[in-house]
Amino acid sequence: MVQQLSLFGSINDDGYDLLISTLTTISGNPPLLYNSLCTVWKPNPSYNVENLNSRNQLVEPNRIKLSKELPFSYLIDEAMVGKPLNFKILKSFTNDRIPLDYSMTRNILHNEVPQTSNVNNTDESKNDNEHDGSAADASENKNDIIDVDMDPNPVVCNKSCSPWSLQISDIPAAGNNRSVSMQTIAETIILSSAGESSSISSLMSGLGFVFEFQYLTIGVKFFMKHGLVLELQKIWQIEEAGNSQITGGGFLIKAYINVSRGTDIDRINYTEGVLMNLKKELQGYIELSVPDRQSMDSRVAHGNTLI
């Protein structure tokens, strides 16, 4: 369990390259490309459960968030095949269209690996792409002020073997004069589940939870000093009726630091100062602020949340 102190902001698509260059300079580290399929589960309404703790106090039921990283072969279309998997590929995700759909995520939840067609290329075409693209990539990188490319020849696969992360969060602390958002988060890793039909869906059903909604994030992370992590991400709602990009035209920015002990006041105050220094350093370019705490409330009595 940690106390997460955070600030949020946004930026338009046009300012993406400049922001990447700026944050690379500030952090001294290149951005790391990542994705996360996030599924949200609520207590099964068919069960009549007393919401009382061991002290006989009323406790509101909370949603559970399960998330995992997916192979990028699920997320890139034919036009992106052969491009280096680095921060530049994010500029290709400008609309609602994305290969990952509702049926694919249902297969993943039931421990079935969906097959994708965008990586079924022959070795010959792959070699041609590498030969043709190497010179172009080298020329392009020479013109970059800061080269933040990752592995130029990543291996794309169809295996979704990363573990699930289970997370339960409390509503952020109240207070009109708070300079940062502070939220208690409990998290663990699910490596495997037992049973004849073992899957994350059957596991959650056994715990008395049912699927509610899901979303996908694709973005980059910067790991900075003092445990500060800064994320730029695009978010898609994945529904049976189709996908929709919530962050159309821009990126959501999240800067956060986790404090291992909520009673460590000195560390919390120090962490708050680190976030405020970042806010001051980026002021006039990015406005980092504290979001409405209701938008981060995971209790069942409140509406769907995405943050």
Image (spheres, grey):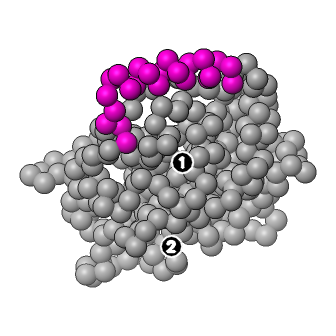
Query: Between 305 and 153, which is closer to the camera in this rendering?
Result: 153
**Image spot of residue 305 (x, y percent):** 54, 68
What residue is rendered at 25% in x and 79% in y?
47
Q: Which residue is mark 2?
A: 304
Q: Nearer the viewer, residue 62 or 307?
A: 307
Quick check: can you spot residue 192?
A: yes
Q: Would residue 192 be found to the left or right of residue 166 on screen?
A: left
Q: Which residue matches tag 1?
A: 218
In the displayed structure, 259 sits above or below 127; it is: below
x and y percentages locating residue 29 in the rendered image: 68, 26
Q: Quadrant of the C terminus?
A: bottom right
In the rendered structure, the answer to whether residue 297 lies left or right of residue 176 reads: left
- Residue at screen point 62% across, 73% down: 294
The stretch drawn in magenta includes residue 52? no
Which of the 4 image quarters holds residue 24?
top right
Amino acid identity at mark 2 = Asn
Q: Nearer the viewer, residue 134 or 87?
A: 134
Q: Residue at 87% of width from left, 42% of height from top? A: 281
Dot 1: element: strand
**Element at label 2:** loop
**Number of numbered callouts drawn:** 2
93 horizontally vs 204: left or right: right
Q: Is residue 305 above or below residue 268?
A: below
Q: Residue 57: give x, y in percent of width and height.
A: 44, 75
The amino acid beneath tag 1 is Ile
The residue depicted at 50 percent of the width and 73 percent of the height is: 304
Q: CA distance from mark 1 to mark 2?
A: 20 Å
Tell me the mark number nearer the camera, choosing from 1 and 2. Answer: 1
Question: Magenta residues, as a range?
Answer: 118-140
Using the rendered view, name the quadrant where residue 293 is placed. Answer: bottom right
Q: Upstream in the sequence, badge 1 or badge 2? A: 1
